[in-house]
Image: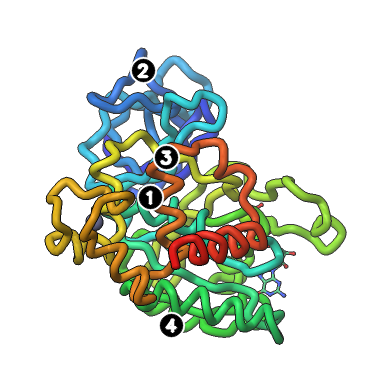
Amino acid sequence: MTGIVYKSTGSWYTVKSENGDFIECRIKGKFRMKGIKSTNPIAVGDVVDFELDETSDTVTGVIHNIHERKNYIVRKSVNLSHQMHIIASNLDYVFLLITINNPPTTFNFIDRFLVTAEAYGIETILVFNKIDTLKDEVLDDQLYMQYVYQQIGYKCLRVSAAEGKGIDELKELMIGKTTMFSGHSGVGKSTLVNAMEPTLHLKTKTISEQSMQGQHTTTFAEMYDLSFGAKIIDTPGIKGFGIVDMEKSEISGYFPEFFKLKDQCKFNNCLHKDEPKCAVKEALEKDEISWTRYNSYLKILEGDEDHYRTDDYANERAESDENRNKQS
Ligand SMILES: Nc1nc2c(ncn2[C@@H]2O[C@H](COP(=O)(O)OP(=O)(O)OP(=O)(O)O)[C@@H](O)[C@H]2O)c(=O)[nH]1
Ligand SMILES: [Mg+2]
Ligand SMILES: [Zn+2]
């Protein structure tokens, strides 16, 4: 039998078979994907072959084969830094949910996410949630952040899961697709799924829990079939986005606005750092490339892998200004 993995809790996988039944499955023996060293051999979104387990009283299954993935997205495992964790596979898009201050989402975090998504060939759409709460400087910050990413060509949406704003446009993009919601804990991923499909009643953070930092309301990635013909994967919030090891020379290729200029740099192996006649740095000085993006690039280039856990927005702004002043 063949099915799609809808949920994974570690040792058990919920698989939806072709005839629509949900079956709890285990894995047979060792399961190693070639070329991938990951903490989870099978992820939500995987297409698998399985057999029903006759020896068990309840109906369970055993997965014995995984179909080749169209794509997948990974991040560095939090505990085992040399391993990666496959977040989900076979995606049409990823929606990265962003809130400005509750909780804060930094440029650095977004850029790390985007670099990985670019590297793994997954289109990301930025979704600014909680727009009902924005005013004054926070609203300016949001509009500026959106401007930075729109300039580069990333599609951006503004929504309010709480008030149902912008939901129709989002739904439109999701019809017939498999997509995933990602972003920090508390940005409203599950609330947004509920806003699109109120009958699901996914668990979301209550008012009394809102001040509790670091508490994840959603604990496992899970896929849902939505009534308007979409599949959505709701995921647990991520704290820092660890980038799986990349060659230094490869990183700038995942910044689309740098990539476009690369042929105009004097050296064809230019890292856009200290080299003379670098088109990226020239564009930066003319403010055609955003300093926040360049800073993120430098950090990834330096392999400052501890940094991503301690980001904050104010620091980031200050750092960005400091670098700009140094340069001019
Ligand atoms: N004002 C406002 N609050 C929102 C909006 N969307 C979500 N919230 C609130 O934000 C809190 C967090 O929402 P969740 O949906 O639990 O967040 P999550 O991203 O699923 O979090 P994790 O499951 O921990 O990753 C809840 O109290 C929601 O009511 C919004 O558009 N506006
Ligand atoms: Mg959630
Ligand atoms: Zn260059």
Residue 67, quarter of picture: top left
Q: Residues within 10 Å of mark 3 (few under 14, many from 20)?
A: few
Q: Residue at x 48, y 76 (%)?
A: 146
Q: Amino acid at mark 3?
A: Glu
Q: Which mark is residue 169?
A: 4
Q: Residue at x 17, y 46 (%)?
A: 269
Q: Earlier in the sequence, mark 1 or mark 2?
A: 1
Cβ atoms at labels 1 and 4 below 8 Å apart: no
Secondary structure of the residue carrying numbered label 1: loop
Q: Which mark is residue 322?
A: none
Tell which of 325 and 219 is nearer to you: 325
Q: CA distance from mark 2 to mark 3?
A: 41 Å
Cβ atoms at labels 1 and 2 below 8 Å apart: no
Q: Earlier in the sequence, mark 1 or mark 4?
A: 1
Q: Is mark 4 within 8 Å of ligand 1?
A: no
Secondary structure of the residue carrying numbered label 4: helix
Q: Amino acid at mark 4?
A: Glu
Q: CA distance from mark 1 to mark 4?
A: 28 Å
Q: Which mark is residue 302?
A: 3
Secondary structure of the residue carrying numbered label 3: helix
Q: Earlier in the sequence, mark 4 or mark 2?
A: 2
- Please name which of the two marks, 2 or 3, marks the residue nearer to the observer: 3
Q: Amino acid at mark 1?
A: Gly
Question: Label 2, on which residue?
Answer: 28
Q: Which mark is residue 20?
A: 1
Q: CA distance from mark 3 to mark 1?
A: 48 Å
Q: Residue at x 35, y 59 (%)?
A: 178
